[in-house]
Image: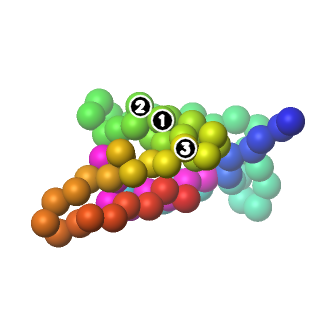
Amino acid sequence: MKIEIIGWETEGLRCLDMNINLLSGDKYAHFSLVKMPNGTAKTTTLSLIRAAMSGEKVRSFCMVNKFNSRGTFV
């Protein structure tokens, strides 16, 4: 099985709200590098991708406070 990730979007989780597009124009890129500073949730993002691919719930990644009780990962 071949799986190609063309991007992801996060909002309200323990990582930055972001919308990452890995397409090169309208084509799939052969490879993509994601470089982010320390403390910007690279490991959390990888865990979210693993969870999404396995069907695991990602509720534990929600950043719950009085302003936000929901998060999304697409």
Which circle, 2 or 1, is nearer the viewer? 1
- Mark 2 → mark 1, Cα distance in angstroms: 6 Å
Badge 2 amino acid: Thr
The residue labelled by disc 1 is 47
Asked whether residue 5 appears in the rendered view, the answer is yes
The answer to whether the residue labelled 3 contacts the one labelled 2, judged by CB atoms less than 8 Å apart, is: no
Q: Mark 3 to mark 2: distance in Å?
A: 16 Å
Q: Would you say residue 16 is visible in this rendering? A: no
Q: Amino acid under label 1?
A: Ser
Quarter of the image with the C terminus is bottom right
Q: Is residue 52 left or right of residue 61?
A: right
- The region drawn magenta spans 7-15
Q: Is residue 9 magenta?
A: yes
Q: Position of residue 6 (x, y in %)?
A: 67, 51
User: Label 2, on which residue?
Assistant: 43
Left or right placement of residue 49 versus residue 18 in this view: right
Dot 3 or dot 2: first in sequence order is 2
62 displayed left or right of 29: left
Name the foreground residue: 27 vs 60. 60
Q: CA distance from mark 3 to mark 1?
A: 10 Å
Q: Which residue is mark 3?
A: 56
The picture places residue 1, in percent across and down from the top left corner, at 86, 36
Q: Is residue 53 left or right of residue 73?
A: right
The local crowd at label 3, few if under 14, some if 14 to 19, many if 20 or more residues have their Cα within 10 Å, is: few
The answer to whether the residues at label 3 and label 1 have Cβ atoms under 8 Å apart is no
Q: Amino acid at mark 3?
A: Glu
Which type of secondary structure does the marked residue at label 2 adopt? helix
Is 65 in front, or is 22?
65
